[in-house]
Image: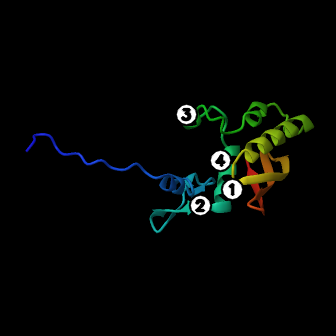
Amino acid sequence: MSIFPVVEEVEDSTTEEIENINTVNPAFDYENKKIILKDGRVTFYTGKEKIQQWIKLLIRTEVGKYRVYENTEFGLADFYNLLGHQLFNSSYGISEMKAELQEKIEAKEEVSSVEDITITYKSNKLYIELTVIVDEETLEMEVAA
């Protein structure tokens, strides 16, 4: 008998378990800034809803602003660099934002392509309409920023 405890080795998580962790995202309500609960439990998005939420988060995140995204280049730089310069009404500003959005969204593994981006500026709000192809299905969405 030893005075030290016997330690049993535990196998590492399999890659299948790790992949399953990344297949769902907690559902988030951007208007109320809360995670969506149903019957006291966190709800999760998968598939196209997950991509929609990811795009909304991408648009609402400035590169380098939050430590959680440090060294990831997640978010938009041109959008926030142009903010306040009244370039939302110019063709230059809109084309720069479209190019950055298309590049960042198409870099997402699940996204096949970005078919259309329309950016309009009304009443001190920027409205971004997107048509994205995900798994050969068309995903249309509008984000107010």
Disc 3 on helix, strand or loop?
Answer: helix
- Of mark 1 and mark 4, the one earlier in the sequence is 1
Disc 2 on helix, strand or loop?
Answer: strand
In contact (CB < 8 Å): disc 1 and disc 4: no
Q: Position of residue 21 (x, y in %)?
A: 51, 54
Q: Which mark is residue 57?
A: 4
Q: Which mark is residue 45?
A: 2
Three-letter residue code for mark 3? Arg
The N terminus lies in quadrant: top left
Q: Is 145 positioned to the left or the right of 28 in the image?
A: right
Q: Is 19 positioned to the left or the right of 105 in the image?
A: left
Task: Check the image and report above or below for 76 versus 40.
Answer: above
Q: Position of residue 63 (x, y in %)?
A: 66, 34
Front-most of residues 80 and 46: 46
- Of mark 2 and mark 3, the one earlier in the sequence is 2
Q: Residues within 10 Å of mark 4 (few under 14, many from 20)?
A: some
Total marks in image: 4
Separation (CA) of disc 1 from disc 2: 9 Å
Q: Which mark is residue 67?
A: 3
Q: Is 136 positioned to the left or the right of 33 in the image?
A: right
Disc 4 on helix, strand or loop?
Answer: helix
- Which residue is denoted by mark 1 in the rendering? 52
